[in-house]
Amino acid sequence: MAKQYEASSIHSRGWYLQLLQLPATWQIPRGLNNTARIVLLVHVTGSSGNDSWGVSSYKLLPPKGYAIAWVNLPGNALGDSQISTEYVAYNIEQLRGTAPWARSQS
């Protein structure tokens, strides 16, 4: 399970969205068995994390010691980019200290 922070720590960051919405957007298909090396995958516009990563070559990473997580952005990332960014930022915050790198379309 992802590292949990005290509510005051999260609220001090000024999240726009309700905190109850944000955790429901991520998937960790094999769990965080190796939290020293985790990759957060962010899908491209017009797709979802499940579509992009559910049957992809990400499966090559766990045998090399990486835990995999991905985010499902609302509306397949076709809406307000500031809201999509908040979902990504929240996930990075939750995985902070365990993720050496992340992938995005940019």
Image (cartoon, helix red, strand yellow):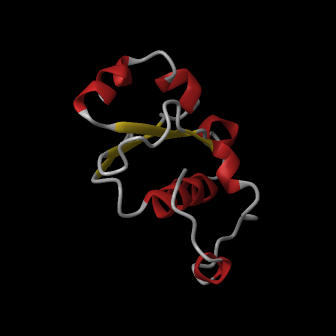
Question: Which residue is found at the position 46% from the left and 58% from the top?
Answer: 92
Give the total number of marks visible in the rendering: 0
Between 19 and 103, the residue placed more toward the observer is: 19
Where is the C terminus found, in terms of image quarters?
Answer: top left
Q: Is residue 91 visible?
A: yes
Question: Which residue is found at the position 53% from the left and 37% from the top?
Answer: 28
Q: Quadrant of residue 75?
A: top right
Q: Residue furthest left?
A: 64
Question: Which residue is found at the position 48% from the left and 31% from the top?
Answer: 30
Between 32 and 19, the residue placed more toward the observer is: 32
Q: Residue furthest top?
A: 55
Question: Would residue 78 be found to the left or right of residue 38 on screen?
Answer: right
Q: Is 17 rendered above or below residue 106?
A: below
Q: Is 99 rendered above or below residue 4?
A: above
Between 85 and 29, the residue placed more toward the observer is: 29
x and y percentages locating residue 56 in the rendered image: 41, 18
Q: Is 63 rendered above or below residue 68?
A: above
Q: Quadrant of residue 96?
A: bottom left
Q: Residue furthest front?
A: 33
Question: Would residue 34 be found to the left or right of residue 84 on screen?
Answer: left
Question: Which residue is found at the position 63% from the left and 39% from the top?
Answer: 78
Q: Is residue 46 visible?
A: no
x and y percentages locating residue 34 in the rendered image: 35, 43
Q: Quadrant of residue 85?
A: bottom right
Question: Would residue 101 be found to the left or right of residue 75 on screen?
Answer: left
x and y percentages locating residue 55 in the rendered image: 48, 15
